[in-house]
Amino acid sequence: FELPLYRIDMIAIFSGRHGTPESAFAQACHMLESMAPAVVWFDEIEAGINTQAKEGELARIFGFFLTWMQEKTRGLFVGATANRIDLLPAEMIRKGRFDEVFFVDLPLEDERLDIFRVHLRRRGVDFEGFNFEPLKTFTKGWTGAEIEQCVVSALTTARLEERGLTDADLFNATANVVPLSKTMKEQVDQIRKWAFARAVRASPRERYS
């Protein structure tokens, strides 16, 4: 839509670097109205729940946000991301606040290979001729960040040996990554259980692998 995108970092809001969280959040919302039309992205909106914010202060911030979302009249398209949406109060995600709730699960097989290609391309690696297919099995349950770390690790190995990167380097690097889906399996399963019943899946495919 050729509109500017503004990102509100909720971790920074609650850090105290910009004054009290309550004041900083309200100022940010009012400032955004003066910049309309625009797209607004509240990043890690549940961050305050995982900080040392006082319960009363947190309630006032969420209360202000709910009222602002309901009453704002300027041309702002508002979106938010959350790692732990199950921690948010129910009134924040009901219809009327946000039009829809989407769940972005761990990437599927083909999506994981696409992420490998993205990070290799960003680093100027010519991967023509690479056989990516075995990585589908080796990276089951991985996040995008874990795939990026695998690429970085493989590149480091190749550069230390003063040679170009090979697909074998990528395969070898997978052995050093223990995915979050294993180390935090119970939490990941809990989030999935919540989301599968309450959100629209971002991927159109039914098979999650």
Image (cartoon, rainbow, N blue to C red):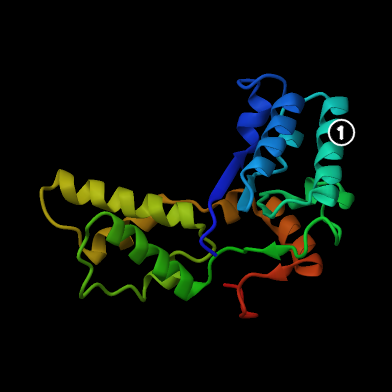
Q: Tell me: residue 4, above or below residue 194.
A: above
Query: Which residue occupies the foreground of this view, 93 or 72?
Result: 72
Q: Is residue 52 visible?
A: no
Question: Would residue 51 appear left or right of 92 to someone viewing this image?
Answer: left
Query: Which residue occupies the foreground of this view, 155 or 199?
Result: 199
Question: Would residue 38 appear left or right of 22 to someone viewing this image?
Answer: left
Q: Residue at x 86, y 31 (%)?
A: 60
Q: Is residue 15 visible?
A: yes
Where's residue 15, x and y in %?
64, 25
Crowding near pointer 1: few (<14 within 10 Å), some, many (20+)? some
Q: Name which residue type carries label 1.
A: Ala
Q: Quadrant of residue 47?
A: top right
Q: Residue at x 58, y 54 (%)?
A: 182
Where's residue 200, x and y in %?
72, 70
Q: How many marks?
A: 1
Query: Which residue occupies the foreground of this view, 77 or 174?
Result: 77
Where's residue 124, x and y in %?
22, 57
| Callout 1: SS | helix
Where's residue 40, x and y in %?
63, 49
User: Where does the C terminus fall, quadrant-wise?
Assistant: bottom right
Q: Residue at x 71, y 48 (%)?
A: 84
Question: Would residue 178 appear left or right of 135 to someone viewing this image?
Answer: right
Q: Residue at x 65, y 54 (%)?
A: 185
Find disc 1 in the rendering and name its residue: 59
User: Where does the N terminus fall, quadrant-wise?
Assistant: bottom right
Question: Would residue 172 appear left or right of 187 to someone viewing this image?
Answer: left
Q: Tell me: residue 36, above or below residue 174.
A: above
